Image (spheres, rainbow, N blue to C red):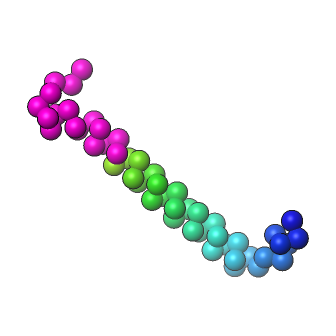
Amino acid sequence: MENALRASPFEIKEQYERQIKDLQEAYGEAMLALRARKKFPSLLGEDEK
């Protein structure tokens, strides 16, 4: 807890911005995977159920 009190607001801001960037990238990858799963059957010529 002492380390948290010693951290500068700028360091904390950078840490949160990195976390936000990582989460946005993970979300984008997950959305691409979902879209690919939806389109995969049609690309194979299979009927969607």
Q: Quadrant of residue 7?
A: bottom right
- Residue found at x 74% / y 76%: 9
Q: Residue lying furthest top in this view?
A: 49
**Is 1 left, or right, of 7 in this rendering?**
right
Q: Quadrant of the C terminus?
A: top left
Q: What is the number of callouts on the image?
A: 0
| Residue 24 painted magenta | no
Type of secondary structure dominating the magenta stretch: helix
Q: Residue at x 29, y 38 (%)?
A: 37
Percent x, y of residue 42: 16, 34
- Residue drawn at (63%, 66%) of the image: 16
Percent x, y for residue 8? 76, 79
Residue under the point 27% across and 36% down: 38
Q: Quadrant of the N terminus?
A: bottom right
Q: Is residue 4 left or right of residue 46?
A: right
Q: Is residue 9 above or below residue 16?
A: below
Residue found at the far front of this picture: 44
List the single residue furthest toward the left. Answer: 45
41 falls in the magenta region: yes
Above or below — where is 35 with respect to 15? above
Percent across and percent down for residue 31 are 38, 47
Residue interval drawn in magenta: 33-49
The answer to whether 9 appears left or right of 17 in the picture is: right
